[in-house]
Image (cartoon, helix red, strand yellow):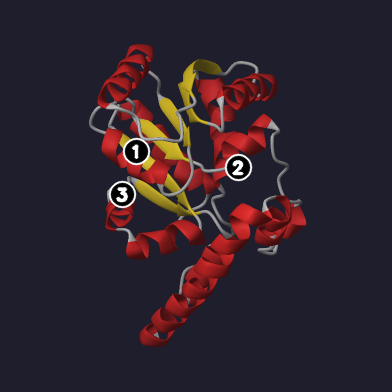
Amino acid sequence: MTDYEGAMEVMDNLVETRERGYVCATPVHALMVAQDDHEMMSALHGATMVVPDGMPLVWASNLLGESLEDRVYGPELMRRYCQRSAERGHRVWLYGGRDQGTLVQLALSLRRNHPDIQIVGGYSPPFRPLGDQEESEIVDQINEARPDVLWVGIGVPKQEKWMAHMRDRLDVPVMCGVGAAFDFHAGRIPMAPRWMQDNGLEWAYRIAQEPGRLLPRYLYYNPRFLVSFARQYLAER
């Protein structure tokens, strides 16, 4: 239950102490996946911080007695903390993207928007699981670069599970899973207008962009979230 500034203070503290941790920017989809996926639930419970990525989570939290004014949206958290990283000299590594071309576009975009940012490496993994040797090679690459912040954009629930699995192997104080932020900041997919984001309508905009992939997800998980929330709300009242 926090805002952007509070989340970034936690990330700053991890960088300063070099304590290994990871942050999950979590929308409704991720929370509902965790209800059926024990590994995903374990990854969320093991995170340093899980922040409310979607407006429905903000509204639900406030109905349960919290006083959140806004969500902590993964792409916006990435934008803000990349600016802070540029100002403070944090070293940044990028893990994700649909392909290497998207990752290159992301790096170019970040350098254009944050001229002093230090991007010290990146990798766009294949969609299949990595073999043991491939995983060890990536671990060596990341640790040799000694990043302060590792942004992870490989989608839910892969990114949460990956961060939980890799935390003890990577000498990185901050890993942060931000989902589609890589595509947004690379310019591959446009973000919803601000008014749609503020009113919880981003899902409609995203469905219009990728109906085949996203419509089944929303039709399955959103009603389940409403039912689960209603049960919790009635129980607490």
Name the quadrant containing residue 233: bottom left
Question: Could you give the CA–CA distance between mark 1 and mark 3, rounded to whole angstroms?
Answer: 8 Å
Identify residue for label 2. 76
Question: Could you give the CA–CA distance between mark 1 and mark 2, rounded to whole angstroms?
Answer: 20 Å
| Other-residue count near label 1 (Cα within 10 Å), few / some / many at <14 / 14–19 / ≥20 | many
Identify residue for label 3. 43
In this rendered view, identify the residue nearer to me: 86 or 134.
134
In this rendered view, identify the residue nearer to me: 139 or 71.
139
Type of amino acid at the residue the image marks with label 1: Met
Type of amino acid at the residue the image marks with label 2: Glu
Q: Could one spot residue 171 in this view of the protein?
A: no
Task: Name which residue lies at 53% across and 46% down.
Answer: 4
Q: Is residue 44 left or right of residue 177?
A: left
Question: Could you give the CA–CA distance between mark 2 and mark 3, rounded to whole angstroms?
Answer: 22 Å
Name the quadrant containing residue 107: top right
Task: Name which residue lies at 40% across and 51% down.
Answer: 50
Q: Earlier in the sequence, mark 1 or mark 3?
A: 3
Identify residue for label 1. 163
**Residue at the top extreme?**
144
Q: Earlier in the sequence, mark 2 or mark 3?
A: 3
Type of amino acid at the residue the image marks with label 3: Ala
Coordinates of residue 29 in the picture (x, y in percent): 49, 59
Please report contact status of discs 1 and 3: CB closer than 8 Å, yes or no: yes
| Other-residue count near label 3 (Cα within 10 Å), few / some / many at <14 / 14–19 / ≥20 | many
Please report contact status of discs 2 and 3: CB closer than 8 Å, yes or no: no
For discs 1 and 2, the disc positioned in front in the rendered view = 1
